[in-house]
Image (cartoon, rainbow, N blue to C red):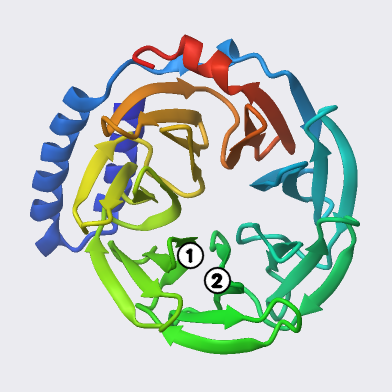
Amino acid sequence: MILEAYTSEITARLVHTPAVNRRILIVSQALALGWLSSSLAAAPRPIAELAPLATVKLGQTADWVAITADAVWVASTGPFAVHRIDPKTNRLAASVNLPGEPCAGLAVGSGSLWVPLCTAPPSLAKVSLKSSQLVSIFPVGPAAAEGGIAYGAGSVWLIVNKSGDLARIEPGSGKILRTYRLPAGSYNPIFADGTIWVSHAEGAELTGVDAATGKVRATVATGPNPRFLTAGAGAIWTLNQGDGNVTRVERSGHASSIALGTPGHGGDISFSAGRVWTTMPKMPLSVIDAAAGKLICQWTGPGGDSLGIGHGAIWLTDYHAGTVSRIPVEDALAKCSGS
């Protein structure tokens, strides 16, 4: 199924590729397919074998997950809202209605949940973690859907236009303190060890910006169309929508690629306990051993698109069903060959 999905994606690209470039694309993808078929760790398993402890219905769709010490937050459409789930009871504890679609990730910081909205014009919602109430709507928002937001060094970080302007936002007032120009088509930031890392979704690289000085620390090549990213085990990990691989970027700047065979739009990635977890539609869960840099297990079937790891569980959304499920991490690893 992985090879079939990959082949289908490449065939679709060939239709829109100028003839002069098709030979290069065909050769490179033939090599990639050969490598992919020999490097995948194991045949995908059915997602039905992972029995959730609980499944919570949130809306028409469910997307974006944020984990705090005492809650799990998930966004939805139909209604436009963010929902607080109590991990002690696995029940919905609160819902916060929003004036538009939560479309570009969730971030936690300064006692708040930060929710970029695809309103007209785009905006940013601030929700109190303590009271589960909407505090403010700031007139600054995401450059595109499937973007992201980060919190670090006392600030909120958000790409605010397609030109690649990374805004540093003051949490109290919502004021933009400074902007830093990155490659156009960069949308997704993450904060790690004093650096804001931003993936170039319309390119093939990762840019690191020093949060204290605003200077670019590093630019590292990744796979094509890196979108979502996470940090852990001394590295930044990007989920590349162009080839369906994960790129590992170490602190030294060395980059390596791990084949998942899951190209396409959507998806998410998270790090926990020495493993990198990814989700994509129709391949709702994949697990990478971070130390070995190796894919060790995948599950195929319905569901997927966003996830978070916390409270001993994988919180996995089924985007089209509008649900989030709690799957014990230990159960998944017990069924995962090579774990």
Closer to viewer: mark 1 or mark 2 = 2
The circle drawn on residue 153 is: 2
Q: Dividing the picture into quarters, in which one does residue 313 lie?
A: top right
Please determine whether, in this image, residue 91 is positioned above or below residue 269: above
In the image: residue 186, left or right of residue 46: left
**Who comes first in sequence, dot 1 or dot 2?**
2
Q: Dividing the picture into quarters, in which one does residue 258 lie?
A: top left
Residue at image position (48%, 65%) is 189
Residue at image position (42%, 32%) is 275
Residue at image position (53%, 17%) is 332
In the image: residue 155, left or right of residue 259: right
**Residue bearing mark 1:** 189
Quadrant including the C terminus: top left
Quadrant including the N terminus: top left
Q: How many marks?
A: 2
**Few, some or many residues within 10 Å of mark 2 (<14, 14–19, 20+):** some
Q: Which amino acid is tagged 2?
A: Ala
Q: Position of residue 320 (x, y in %)?
A: 67, 38
Please determine whether, in this image, residue 220 is positioned above or below residue 54: below
Q: Which amino acid is tagged 1?
A: Pro
Please determine whether, in this image, residue 45 is positioned above or below residue 184: above
Q: Position of residue 198 (x, y in %)?
A: 41, 66
Nearer the observer, 323 or 249: 249
Q: Secondary structure at mark 2?
A: loop
* Residue 230 visible: yes
Q: Are marks 1 and 2 in contact (CB under 8 Å)?
A: no
* Residue 243 visible: no
Q: Position of residue 12 (x, y in %)?
A: 32, 47
Q: Position of residue 250 (x, y in %)?
A: 27, 52
Residue at image position (21%, 57%) is 252
Q: Secondary structure at mark 1?
A: strand
